[in-house]
């Protein structure tokens, strides 16, 4: 499985098919199960950018900033600026 590091905790990254045509989710994050889910149908660039978005949510949730994590505008601004500046997350293989 592929993981990324969130505050020292490996979060599993799964790319999945949307449930149906109307399901246009880009990504989801579960900081209890330590799983980030990305829509497999997106372009490589969108997946990378979405992974940054979910990683930011995961950091905030893991560190007890759940209320700030609920601010989608803030998370999206950070996502976009990190992505524009060339920041990329590198997934690691874990058994
Ligand atoms: Zn979000």
Image (cartoon, grey):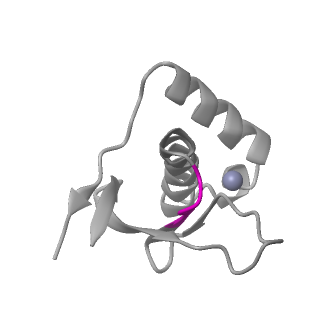
- Quarter of the figure with residue 61: bottom right
Q: Is residue 26 left or right of residue 54?
A: right
- Residue 86: % across, % down: 43, 23
**Residue 40 part of the magenta-drawn span:** yes
User: Residue visible at 28% across and 57% down?
Assistant: 8
Most foreground residue, 18 or 60: 18
User: Residue visible at 53% across and 63% down?
Assistant: 40
**Residue 38 part of the magenta-drawn span:** yes
- Residue 70: % across, % down: 74, 55
- Residue 88: % across, % down: 39, 35
Q: Is residue 10 left or right of residue 27?
A: left
- Quarter of the figure with residue 1: bottom left
Residue span colored magenta = 37-42
Q: Residue furthest top?
A: 85
- Quarter of the figure with residue 93: bottom left
User: Residue visible at 71% across and 63% down?
Assistant: 25
Most foreground residue, 27 or 6: 27
Q: Residue furthest right?
A: 22
Q: Is residue 86 left or right of residue 82?
A: left
Location of the C terminus (image quadrant)? bottom left
- Residue 56: % across, % down: 54, 47
Most foreground residue, 20 or 3: 20
Q: Is residue 76 above or below residue 9?
A: above
Q: Is residue 12 above or below residue 44?
A: below
User: Residue visible at 76% across and 48% down?
Assistant: 71
> What is the count of numbered marks?
0
Q: Is residue 4 above or below residue 73?
A: below
Q: Is residue 89 left or right of residue 37?
A: left
């Amino acid at each position: 499985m592929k993981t990324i590091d969130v505050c020292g905790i490996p979060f599993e990254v799964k790319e999945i098919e949307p449930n149906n045509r109307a399901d246009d989710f880009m990504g989801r994050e579960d900081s209890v199960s330590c799983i980030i889910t990305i829509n497999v149908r997106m372009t490589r660039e969108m997946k990378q950018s979405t992974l940054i978005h979910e990683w930011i949510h995961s950091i905030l949730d893991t560190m007890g900033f759940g209320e700030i994590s609920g601010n989608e505008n803030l998370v999206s601004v950070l996502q976009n600026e990190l992505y524009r500046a060339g920041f990329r997350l590198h997934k690691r293989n874990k058994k």
